Amino acid sequence: MIRFCKILAVLLLLPLFGSGQMVDTSFRQASFVEFSSENDLYQIALKADKEFTNGLSLRVGDQAFRNLGTRWLAIPMKSGVREYAWSISQDMYTPEDIRNTEVDTTDRPYCGLLYLTFSAYSTDWNKGRRWTSELQVGIQGPAAGAKQTQNWLHSNTNNWIVEGWDNQIGNGLLLDYRISVQDIITKNISYLESSTFATLQVGTMRNFVAVGLQNKIGWFNSSYANFGGLQNRNQPRNQEVKASNGDRTVFLNRPWQAYLVADIGVSTIFYDGTTQGSLIPFEESVYTLDPAQITRFNAISRLGISLSYGRTQLSYLWVVTGYQVRYSNLIGWGEFRLSVSL
């Protein structure tokens, strides 16, 4: 337990120390635009409007964000490169029975989130290590527009209008900070890349810690360059570079990629604002859940495929996890992601 607390303390304090790092200032990051759509309809099994039911996100990466207030987020490293991105996202959560217009205090409340994410990535591809530092700023509640988005989607797919959104969690502040570290564990294996990861998030909405294993199998660029393997027009194409310690080869800017994704993780949840409301509410909610009703320990798996040619990448992920409320079982959703390097 003492060791675990020390790790958490290091994760929290690292962003405060920003001097003495040796950053490759000649590096030009990949500029890109990425759109992702998540929905429970994008899967064969587990189709149901319950828990996380829909997510939309638009992310843009460019070196210009370094000078627009994101630079201070970057985690210091002795050597490596830095990349920056901004995104806007909308998430929505619903109870299991979306036809019920009455309050059901045994199930999770409706919840909508609308927020900006400011991201800084510090990467040493020689060591195979990446730090991700993110600040999320936004709103929870009716002001997030989740009711309008879901009912618009339902009306255009011949589904019923969801009336229960009038019982959603009230407006509140979303202000969260997330820090993650990813470390490679495979060496010179051309068609397999395995990495461990650890994540800590604290703030007004979600407080949790997670650890797990990420895997890529197939023909791919290194995950430790260019936002997980996008093509970068500022670098030569089809590079094969030896890491400085000679223990592995890094592939960059391949003209095409085709690989499978298989991730697994576990998490401990300390506070969940999507069921309990923001820690800084602007108004009262119709109802929220008690802490005893929420699952504190959870597991998650992600299976998917990614295809790219040139500067365009299309990915699909199937996500399966446990329902946040104690009495229920597994839930799942699919995610389509389109990324275009500029």
Image (tube, grey):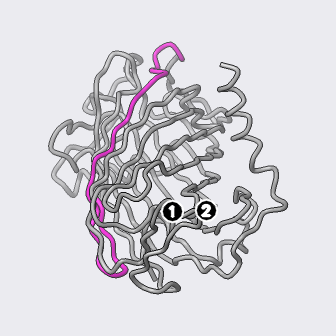
Give how far across and how far down residue 28 sits, in percent: 60, 80
User: In screen coordinates, is 326 left or right of 155?
Assistant: right
Give how far across and how far down residue 50 sits, in percent: 31, 34
Q: Badge 2, how many Cα within 10 Å: few under 14, some, many 20+?
A: many
Q: Residues at badges 2 and 1 in contact (C-beta under 8 Å)?
A: yes
Which residue is the site of mark 2? 124
Q: Does the magenta stretch include residue 152?
A: no
Which of the 4 image quadrants contains residue 70? Answer: bottom right
Q: Is residue 308 magenta?
A: yes
Furthest-top residue in view? 292
Which of disc 1 and disc 2 is earlier in sequence? 2
The amino acid type found where label 2 is placed reads Asp
The foreground one among 267 and 81 is 81
Give how far across and how far down residue 158 sits, in percent: 15, 52
Which residue is the site of mark 1? 224
Give how far across and how far down residue 238 sits, in percent: 39, 81
Q: Badge 1, how many Cα within 10 Å: few under 14, some, many 20+?
A: many
The amino acid type found where label 1 is placed reads Tyr
The foreground one among 189 and 312 is 189
Residue in the image at 58% along x and 62% along y:
245
How far separated are the C-alphas under marks 2 and 1?
A: 7 Å
- Predominant SS along the magenta part: strand
Task: Give the residues drawn in magenta, as a range.
Answer: 291-315
Residue in the image at 62% along x and 47% along y:
179
User: In screen coordinates, is 286 left or right of 322?
Assistant: right
Q: In this view, does 148 lie above or below 3?
A: below
Residue in the image at 49% along x and 66% along y:
227
The foreground one among 217 and 152 is 217
